[in-house]
Every structure is written in structure tokens, then in C-alpha cells.
Amino acid sequence: MGLSTTRLGLYNPDKPLENRITDIGPRHFWEFFPPIIKRNYGKWKYHRILEPGVLMHVSETGEKVYTVRCGAPRIMSAEYIREVCDIADKYCDGYVRWTTRNNIEFIVDSLEKVEALKKELQSRKFYSGSYKFPIGGTGTALTNIVHTQGYIHCHTPATDASSLVKALMDELFEYFQKMVFPAKVRISMACCLNMCGAVHCSDIALLGIHRKPPIVDDEVLEANCEIPLVIAACPLGAISPAKTPDGKKTVKIKKERCMFCGNCYTMCMALPLADKEGDGIAVLAGGKVSNRISPPKFSKVVVPYLPNNFPRYPEVCEVVKRILETYAKDARKYERLGDWAERIGWEKFFEKCGLEFTEHLIDDYRLQYDTYRTTTQFKFTEPAWKASKAVGGL
Amino acid sequence: MVEFKPKFEQKEIKYEEMRIYTDEELHNYTEDEVKDFKCKHDISTVEQLESGPWPSFVADLKREALHRKRLADDRVMIPKDVIEDLLGQLEVSFRDGETHWKHGGIVGVFGYGGGVIGRYSDMPDKFPGIAAFHTMRVNQPASKFYKTDYLRTLCDLWEFRGSGIFNMHGSTGDIIFLGTNTEQLEPIFFELTHHLQQDLGGSGSNLRTPSCCIGKARCEWSCIDTQDMCYELTTYYQDELHRPAFPYKFKFKFDGCPNCCVASIARADLSFIGTWRDEIRIDQEAVQAYIHGEIPPNGGAFADRDWGKFDIYEEVINRCPAQCMYMEDGKLIIDNKECVRCMHCINVMPEALRPGTDTGVTILIGAKAPILEGAQLSMVIIPFMRAEPPYDNIKEKVIEPIWEWWMEEGKNRERVGELIQRQGVRKLLEVLKVPAFPQLVKEPRSNPYIFWKEEDVPGGWERDIKEFRKRHPR
């Protein structure tokens, strides 16, 4: 029996419980493994990256499996997936996989197939000239950017996501296809502080931020929101109960206390923060999740705000490229961006990257003490002389 | 050969039996026609994203829009022009610098509290196709391997009953169906469960859809069966995944080794990370091959730049965070009891070094993004635990006691990592019935404010002031 083609298919609205199947979970993974993967499960001995985007895994059984990795937009159409399927049917016996970072992997069992597959993938372009399946993203190349919904499908964003990723990957495309960084580089993008993309441990994180406190929609607040929950939602206690002149219950906001986290809006539709002039993008740098050499660490805010210059965000692209190229030139082999910044000192990071250090970058939230410089070990850079001069020390 | 079995018999999906659309319907346009396709709305800003080498989601969405437009009216169950409306609204959002999706909207399928996220446009008159445009989360197979029969069936289903737009994948790992109306939610759920034997994922204050790295399927470093563990715990905790009973969201993620490719340590309330407790396996001949430049370091990850000759001291031995490696008589020696399993030496010389074979998981707890009290990484709570099916030790000794505590004590929208901050790691140890161990912390406390308990102190806390005054008159 095939998929239903009537309006409600198998669902009978008069008897919604009839024939309802629940709690069956995902399809089992094993049926989706290509036979060569099944045969060599748990027996992989080592791997090599033969060229950017092409991996070879060698098994104890002597078998070799080749993977061609392609970048993909996270948002994709049924037509795009069908095209992926056409390629997978032609070269990979109908198997394909996606990576955690939105790349597509085509897996084959011979080098000849790799060559044919590569040719096919490289030949497929959109009418506009964009690659459909650019090959790369392995080793010390830049890999695909993970991101969130943005204006495409979210109610809380402070910027758009798909467009920023497209603009940035166009700008950094050569680095996707060339393994020239000192270590792996992970860029992640989340369009508001809710961070459903969990970008907070990335080499570069791009984060949509608000800069104007919420507007209180007195007319509808009481009817739509639980006032005690709204008040409790503010981590800084900036929200308190109030009444409108005509006696409606509402809330008022101590605007100078607002840190623009948007948690109140998550709890209450009557407190929107979004604003054309207020919203924009913060750039964070130096995070990682791997335990390699140094422990995982958070990304740090290095540019507090850049404008939402749709659709190609030239300011963001320029800054990210500048940071990455400075890192590429200056860091030692195996050094992640954050390890490099820590070795040279963050003051040097700002100097070398030509980024301005402003008061916005000094933590003044919960764990600020941990970020204070409690040693005389630091390097002199221009802003230090400027500060010294300002108090007559020079 | 190893083989893993599903919990329920999985019927094979054959696209030819499942399909909705004919070949003609599937090939109802050409690339040239897409080029000339004019969206019904002005999308001139959005169209600036068509050019450039990276795959253009705009070009892709336009072809889907044209494809839909050419299908017969009764061959799609939601408006044919939803994609044009979506692009039109994106254009307006770019111009306004603000989103046009309304806040919230509670919709779902009967009996589930998650898996569907309501979404409504605030410009329904201008963009009626996307007036109601809900998301459905479809629980992805572990590690995201697919067969094309399954994917093509999913495409037909979603094009017929929804927008035909996907996210592959959402941040948590689900296949995302992006945009359908309320009427089609139940029919889609029925098609998924009956025909594709496929359930929805999590959303809201539920267990969220667990995810894992590629594991032993194609990685030599994985110390655990990440897919099996992910599948087992996902299916075992279906009730927690579909019916919200928690203070807030809860995530499991499974990484096969400390490289953490699925970022469990940063993103999961419970991070399961494969590890070993015996010795790193060494092939001394291969070590020599690296030293003599016969094998490229790090699997060839640095190949497009001249980093000079490989130097085992500079690149491996001196970079070891535990300083537990040295060369002796031309052999690489690792003092394994000093090793912290950071993976660096193994990453650099995969053909010479391999993780040990006495494997299990290190379990960490509490990672989250910054909302509200600040971002947290997971902290170590179980240094080593066997991870063998059906993982009863992990379910009964770790997951369930933590949930019980969190459901009892957690405040509304408090992640478990925040509860630990509020009540202390000592409380967590009581919950887990685990004695304190130094690996829990980076360093011991520096303040002396120890919460001594009465039973810690001889004689207890009750004292008589009169007795005290006998010794110390006022």
C-alpha cells in the first residue's frame, strides 16, 4: 500500500484514536548502513584525507571505503533531496548520509567511483552558477556552518540565518576547498540569544542580538501572559507589575537594567524586542568542543555589534575573514583559534586582528570575576598606552 | 559480523510502492525555466543570494516553487504558492529588519506534547499560503545514514501534504518539515507512523531527540556503539520524548570519543563520551613511517599548505597536555597512567596509535546555551561506565535518579545544569549515590565556606549555653 493521496489520508477526524500508532521512535539505523559499512562496523583501522572533501577509511579486513563530502544549505527542497537521491542511486547503491554540520556524504567502494562521483557533483550547478554540491569541508579546511531558522521560520530572531551563512560561505569558499588553516575551524550561527544552534563553543560564533528593551503591549499582556511568570523570566529583575491608566494589569520595565536576552519575549508575546536599528550581530571567537590538547571552551565576544546589512552582511563577512586570515597567518600548526588567542594573549588578538576593544566586551554578568586580569602578566598594546596616558601615567 | 537489531520489525520501504508522484510530475520543469521563473512577489533583495559559489537556498527554493506551481491542484494539499509567499515574507523581513512570524501557537498531534511547533505569519493577508505554517520534527535515524527509497518517500509525502521544504537537519538532529497547515498535521503523522514506521522528535519540556556521531560505522576512534546507544535510549524513553513532564528541555548526545564531533559536551544535559581505560595501542613501525615522512600527519588534514617536515617532538610529544610521552631506543613510549585521553597523538598519527580496547563512557552533565544564567559545559559525573546493551546501568543508576531529582526540585524552565548550580554538586552526588572524587572539579575550592553537616562533627550541634558560660563567663 502506497502513501495516501486523499486529503486526510489514513486519519479519521471523527475517530482520532482509531488506528493511531505512537511511540515507535526513529527508523533503525542498521538498515540504512551501506553493506560495506555493515561489513566493517567496528573494524576501521585508520583513515586518510586523500584531498579536500575526499576521505578514505581502511578496515582491518583490508576493505577501503571512500567518502566524498559536500557542503549543502541546511534549508533544502524536496527537489534538492531527490537530486541527492539520484546521485546516491547512480554511484552509491542508494545510500547517503548527512553529517552533524549539514554536509552530505556520498560513500563508495573504489577510487574509480570517487572520480566519477566527483565529476558529477562538480558539474551540478544551479541556473545562477552556484554549486549544488561543492566538495570540501575536511581536515583543516573550513567546514559548513551550522545555523538556525532566522526570518525563514522563527518568531524571536534578531537577524536572519540562511542568508548570513550563504553570504559568509560565498566569501570564504576557497577555505572550504583548501586545507590551509592551522587546525579545524568551526563557524556556527544562531539568530538570537536563545541559541538553539548552541554556538557558544565555536571557533567563530555569529549571534543575532537585540539592543532595545521590549515594548510593552499593555492592551493584550494580561490576556495572553502569566504576569508572575513574565516577572520571574527576567534574570535581572527588571520587570515589575503595573497597571494601565484604565486599570488593566500589565508590567513595566526598568530599561536601564535590560540585558536584551529576550527571555521575557519567549515567555510573553506582549513584550517584543525586535527592531530594525536595534538588532544586529555579535561576533564571538575562540571556542571549541574537542578535548584535543586543551579542554573545551566557550567562545568570547570580540565584536559586540555589527549591523544587519541584508542580504550579504558585508561588515560581518569582512570581520570574520579578517580574523580567520590573521589566525591562519599567525597561529602554529594544531593550534585552534582559541588556543592561539590564549597563547598570544587576547590583547594581542585584538591588535593583530585590528579589532577595537570596547567596554561592551568586559563581562559584567554572573561570573565576571573569572575574566579579570589578576596578574601583572600582560602585553603592552596601543590601548594600554592610551589608558595610561588618560590618567597622566605617561 | 556484528549486527544490530531494531526493537520492532522494520518493514522495508520501497519508493515504487509508496510514491505519490509520477515521473512526469517529478520532471515538470527545466533549469532554464527556473531561471526565467518570476516569483509572484517582489523578492529583489532575496534574489541577491542566488549568485556565488555556495549552494543557494534561494535558487533551490525557486525551483521547488516552480515545480509545485506546475502540479495539478489536487496534487498538493496546502497552497501551491507557499514557497513564493515564504520568499515574499523573507523579502519584507529584510526590508523591515524584523521577523514576520507571530509568537507561539499551540498545535500538535493527539496525545503528544512535542514534535510540532506552531507557526503563524503576521501578514496572512499578503501571504495567505503561509498564514499557518507549522514545523514538524521527524526523529532522524542515528548518524543520519539514509536509503534513497526512504528519502524519496519522505519527499513525496512532504511535498503532497506540506511545503516540500526541509531542514537537513535541525540543530538537535531531527529531520525538519518546514511548513504545513493545521489540518495536515494528523494526516502527516498517520502517514509517517503507518507507512514509514517513523515517529516524531521532541520539542518543549521533553526529552529532546537524542543524536550521536558516526561512531563505529565509519570511524576508527569510536569507543562505544553510539548509534545503538542512541537508538536504545530514544526508543526506551519514548514517553519522556513525546509527553512533557520535565521542568524544561533535556538532551542526550553520544560522542564516540573525546574529539566530540557531535558536541555533546557543549550541547547535552547528559553527554555520553566514549573513552578507554587501558593502553593506547601503538604500532612502532608506523610511528617510524610518520617520523620518516612516509605517512602524512593527521590523516592528511594539513595537505594544502607547506608546514615543513613532520617532527614528532614538536607536533606530538611536546604538545601532549599530560607530558606523558617520550622516545626511547627509537620507540615511542606512552606512560598510559598519566594519559588524559585528549586524542591529540591519536589524531596526528592514526595509523600508528589507536585508543585502547577496554572501553566505556565518561558521563558528563549540564551543558546548555547561555539563556539564562550563562552558558555551561557539561561536567564530569561518572568517570567511567560500561556501555553495553541494554544499558540498564546507565538508565537505572544515572538517567532516572537525575530525572527524579530534577522533576522534584527543578523550577519552571530550569535546566539540570542550573539546578546543580543552585543546589550544589554535593546534592547531585547524593542523588547518584556516588562518593566524591577529584575528577569532578578542575581544582578544589579556594573559599573555606564548607557546609559541614551535623553528623560530620563529633557531639553534634546541640550545645548548652549554660555549660559554655561555666567555662566562659559573660
Image (tube, coloured by chain):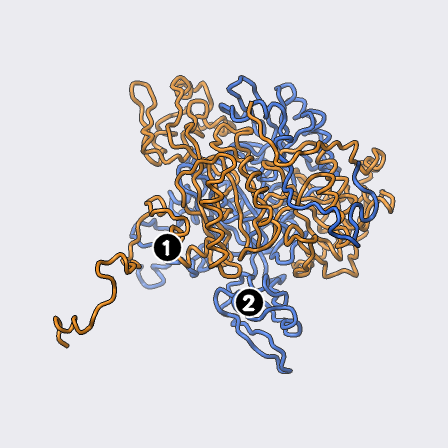
Q: What is the crowding at mark 1: few (fewer than 14 residues within 10 Å), some, or many (at least 20)?
A: few
| Letter of the chain in orange | B
| Letter of the chain in blue | A
Q: Secondary structure at mark 2?
A: helix
- Image quadrant where residue B455 sits: bottom left
The image shows residue B469 at horizontal and vertical percentages of 15, 73
Q: Please report the residue visible at 36 percent of the width from the left and 58 percent of the height from the top.
A: A369
Q: Which mark is residue A229?
A: 2
Q: Give, as a three-letter code, the residue at label 1.
A: Asp
Q: Please report the residue visible at 49 percent of the width from the left and 64 percent of the height from the top.
A: A235
Task: Residue under label 1, please give it.
Answer: A370
Alpha-carbon span between mark 1 and mark 2: 31 Å
User: First in sequence: mark 1 or mark 2?
Assistant: 2
Q: Quadrant of the N terminus of chain B?
A: top right
Q: Which mark is residue B419?
A: none
The image shows residue A190 at horizontal and vertical percentages of 57, 50
- In the image, A344 versus B224, the foreground residue is B224
- Image quadrant where residue B333 sits: top left
Q: Quadrant of the C terminus of chain B?
A: bottom left
